[in-house]
Amino acid sequence: MAGTTQSGSGLDTVIGGPTIDANEALTRADSCEAEGNRIGAIEVLREAAGSGDERVLFKLAWLLDLCGEEEEAISLYTECISGDRPLVNALLNLAVIYEDQGDFNSAEKCLQQILTTNPNHTRARLFMRDVRASKDMFYDESEARDLAKRNALMDTPVTDFELSVRARNCLKKMEIRTLGDLLKVSESELLAYKNFGETSLVEINAMLLTKGLRLGQNLDSHYQRVRADIYEDLRAQAPEEVLNRPISQLDFSVRARKALQMLGVHTVGDLATRTEAELMGIKNFGQTSLDEVRERLGALNLSLRNIE
């Protein structure tokens, strides 16, 4: 029994089971293509699409994409990658469509699915680089407005805020002239300055609190950006599942595990972004714990970050 059809955007979509064999459909579709009859090839493949044969689904998706039917092509490609062994070419083509649509996150997920099982896949690695570059360059108007507002706030002179004469004088001598400058120093740095006491610290913290800010937060953002860049490099060295593995699964000693938790290290990826100096700066973290870390990371073909 032939499948019924519903009208799409210029092409009909067959609903129901296959009316011809997958091999026959592929042969007839090739003949149609050779004659320059792409629409005919699509109609033939639709008749066999209900078989679920990934060769038919892939070729039909490819032809539909060439005809501008992106949404249906996405649906068919998605079906091709739904099994235990996703079709690599379907993932690549799907990533191309998503990138063309400006959906860089979805394109990145498709490529990462390839690289998780085959980290050295040349086309996927090159394409991933392009997608991430495009993602970084993507212009978001609302994000740009928010950034402009934030920059204006960071440029606000500290003299515009209600602070005591002593606090203002100390900040001036420390060459802290704007709110952005103030967010780059920590409480300990302020207290270490001559004549800067707890009263001035409480005063400044209270002022920042009214704006939802705190001392040192721009330092945190800087370190997070640095670690994010390092993490991107790590993704080329190890699968995502390894980088996301909790350190609790690495069989560390109690002392080493507690020290890492104090530093905010929760996964293998977090650990590989740290340096030996950072670890050795933690209380009770000694050479024995450092050797443990080196050994566990080495078993995963990773290491602590080197300072160049």
Image: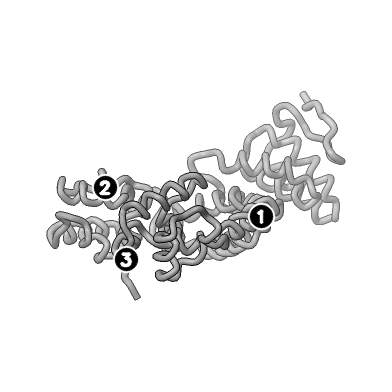
User: Could you tell me residue 262's position as x and y percent?
Assistant: 26, 49
Q: Amino acid at mark 3?
A: Tyr
Q: Of helix, strand and loop, which one carries label 1?
A: helix
| Residue 261 - label | 2
| Crowd class of label 2 (few under 14; some 14 to 19; many from 20; radius 10 Å) | few
Q: Earlier in the sequence, mark 2 or mark 1?
A: 1
**Residue 177 on image: x %, y %:** 50, 66
Residue at the spot 50% in from the left edge and 44% down from the top edge = 210
Secondary element at tag 2: helix
Between 263 and 230, the residue placed more toward the observer is 263
**How many numbered marks are there?**
3
Q: Which residue is mark 1?
A: 99
Looking at the image, is mark 3 or mark 2 earlier in the sequence?
3
Q: Residue furthest front?
A: 165
Work out whether residue 268 or residue 220 is closer to the camera in this orientation and state it.
220
Indicate the secondary structure of the residue bearing disc 3. loop
Query: In 3D space, how far apart are the residues under numbered discs 3 and 2 (Cα atoms)?
Result: 31 Å
Res 278 → quadrant: bottom left
Query: Which is nearer the eye, 38 or 170?
Result: 170
